[in-house]
């Protein structure tokens, strides 16, 4: 399900994307920063409940996130600073889209929709932080989980587009993501504990 499990196929696509977009002359870091532009447009469109154009601009932002790394690898400009910047901008993009959902009049599901949105936001951030903290505190590379960023973005983009036809679809996607992202965070926590050894617990 996750991209890292299909690494070879993904790398072939990444190389093709890198070759094409490297011809435009932008540096990898410029590509990274430029992903904020369509994300901000998507944010505005979502707050206006214009779901189809919002979904399109969100997809463009997510695609640029693929472009920056691809260009960096093809041009031999992979750096630690670039990877760091990419990670930070990814969080901003994801936050912008999830935050915008709070301004959309969506139907509730058992509890108020804003509660699900906040749980989803927390789960998304914790999934990413579980990996970063494992690397920083334990020196362990922790990946995986039932939904990584690529799956989160894909599902959310689909939900936004479907909201054009019926907003309840977006509500269902948010609920699903709220549950799955927090499961993913716990899966990464468990993986970090296993890799570090559970004797200290």
Image: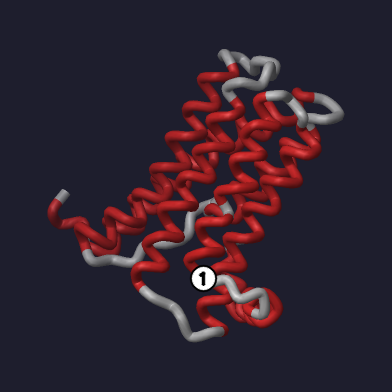
**Residue 6, quarter of the rendered image:** bottom right
Residue bearing mark 1: 28
**Residue 65, quarter of the rendered image:** bottom right
Q: Percent position (x, y) of residue 110?
A: 61, 14
For residue 135, side relative to residue 95 (left or right): left
Q: Percent position (x, y) of residue 116?
A: 54, 24
Visual colour scheme: secondary structure
The residue depicted at 39 percent of the width and 53 percent of the height is 188
Choose between 58 and 4: the one closer to the eye: 58
For residue 98, side relative to residue 198 (left or right): right
The residue depicted at 71 percent of the width and 24 percent of the height is 48
For residue 123, side relative to residue 54 (left or right): left
The residue depicted at 67 percent of the width and 46 percent of the height is 58
**Residue 108, quarter of the rendered image:** top right
Residue 25 drawn above or below residue 37:
below
For residue 124, side relative to residue 46 (left or right): left
Q: Across the whole image, how many numbered discs are drawn on residues?
A: 1
Residue found at the far right of this picture: 165
The N terminus is located in which quarter?
bottom right
- Can residue 116 be spotted in the picture? yes
Q: Percent position (x, y) of residue 90?
A: 49, 52
The residue depicted at 58 percent of the width and 54 percent of the height is 35
Residue found at the far front of this picture: 25
Choose between 20 and 157: the one closer to the eye: 20
- Circle 1: is it few (<14), some (14-19), or many (20+) Cα within 10 Å? many
Residue 155 drawn above or below residue 51:
below
- Can residue 172 be spotted in the picture? no
Tell me the SS state at disc 1. helix
Q: Percent position (x, y) of residue 158?
A: 74, 43
């Amino acid at each position: 399900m996750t991209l890292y499990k299909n690494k070879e196929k993904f790398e072939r696509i990444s190389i093709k994307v890198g070759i094409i977009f490297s011809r435009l002359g932008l540096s990898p870091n410029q590509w990274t920063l430029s992903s904020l532009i369509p994300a901000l447009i998507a944010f505005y469109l979502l707050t206006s409940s214009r779901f189809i154009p919002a979904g399109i601009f969100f997809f463009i932002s997510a695609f640029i996130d693929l472009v920056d790394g691809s260009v960096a690898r093809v041009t031999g400009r992979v750096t630690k600073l670039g990877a760091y910047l990419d990670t930070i901008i990814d969080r901003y993009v994801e936050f912008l889209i999830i935050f915008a959902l709070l301004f959309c009049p969506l139907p509730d599901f058992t509890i108020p929709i804003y509660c699900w949105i906040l749980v989803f936001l927390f789960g998304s951030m914790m999934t990413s932080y579980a990996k970063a903290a494992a690397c920083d505190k334990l020196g362990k590379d922790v990946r995986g989980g039932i939904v990584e960023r690529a799956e989160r973005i894909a599902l959310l983009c689909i939900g936004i587009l479907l909201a054009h036809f019926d907003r309840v679809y977006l509500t269902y996607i948010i609920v699903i993501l709220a549950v799955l992202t927090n499961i993913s965070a716990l899966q990464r926590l468990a993986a970090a504990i296993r890799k570090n050894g559970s004797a200290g617990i």
